[in-house]
Amino acid sequence: MKETLALIIICLSVLLSNAQEIKNPLKASANLQITNNGVSLFPNLSLGKPAAIINATIAKKNFSFEPEFRWALNGKPWSYIFWLRYRYNTEKFSFRVGAHPAYIFGEQSVIIDGKEENRFVTTRYAAAEISPSLNISEKFKLSVHYLRGTRLDNYGVKTSNFLSLQPSFTNLSVGKEYYINFFPQFFYLQLDNKNGTYLSETITFNKTDFPVYLSNMMTYKIKSTVAGDNFVWSLGLNVKL
């Protein structure tokens, strides 16, 4: 926990430095999602039950601090992720690098004073990512995303590798006031000595200048030795804060 607090302080110090500059004001935003099924692209990290997810962003210039907090709807924690990212953007090309510590919570049987009890146990991970993108048009972007993670404890998955091809179709008009965003992706996942290929898609249905929208996520297992269902989906109600 001390490492996380130190990282948060460093991130906020970077973002808040010279915050009074008019040319580069500090920007903040957040999104709250209530979903029927807490899923993750990493099957071993999925919750598999209704969940609440908050994504926040505090950004200045090209740097951003993006914490993500996930809970089951009964209030029990699922995972906390603390991203620090740098973005470089031009009209035709964009580039993102980032790193984070993460805390994954799970209920396990432990021995306390000689008695077996169920307690929440936290597994710590660290990860880094790189993601270049080509901006083909105002509504179409093509990205490659690579993420590598490693555990910080003596249990759990030791190393993970995630590589995906991510087309993005945004602001596709559906009538005068409504639009959809479509994010399909094909990805390869490796967790220690297990691996697999998957196809996933996320669709959002939005109303112009309205803070509430719907999202749907589906993941299909093509071929994999990683434990998990062949097909998972979730429906989310989102509020921009």
Image (spheres, rainbow, N blue to C red):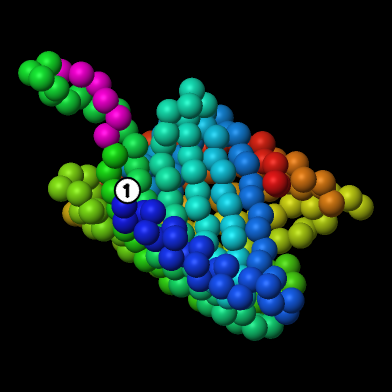
Q: Which residue is mark 1?
A: 1
Q: Residue at x 15, y 18 (%)?
A: 116
Q: Quadrant of residue 230?
A: top left
Residue that appears at 12% across and 16% down: 115
Residue found at the very far right of the displayed protein: 176
Q: Main SS of the magenta segment?
A: strand
Q: Residue 83, percent across and down?
A: 46, 59
Q: Say if residue 47 shows up in the picture.
A: yes
Q: Is residue 149 left or right of residue 16?
A: left
Amino acid type at image mark 1: Met
- Give the camera-side residue of 57 and 211: 57
Is 69 placed above or below 88 here? above
Q: How many numbered marks are there?
A: 1
Vertical placement of residue 15 versus 21, above or below = above
Viewer-nearest residue: 238 or 192:
238
Q: Position of residue 231 (x, y in %)?
A: 45, 38
Examine the structure image and report whether residue 1 is included in the region drawn in magenta. Answer: no
Q: Residues within 10 Å of mark 1 (few under 14, many from 20)?
A: few
Q: Which residues are magenta?
A: 116-121
The one nearer the camera, 217 or 72, is 72
Q: Secondary structure at mark 1?
A: loop
Q: Please state the horizontal and vertical placement of residue 35, each as a whole percent of the image.
A: 58, 34
Q: Please tell me which residue is depicted at 60% across the width and 34% down the height of the picture.
A: 34
In-image side of 180 versus 228 (left or right): right
For residue 164, say whether it is visible.
no
Residue farthest toward the left in the current orientation of the protein? 114
* Residue at the image position 7 percent from the left and 18 percent from the top: 114
Q: Position of residue 170 (x, y in %)?
A: 71, 61
Residue 87 appears left or right of 98: right
Q: Is residue 118 magenta?
A: yes
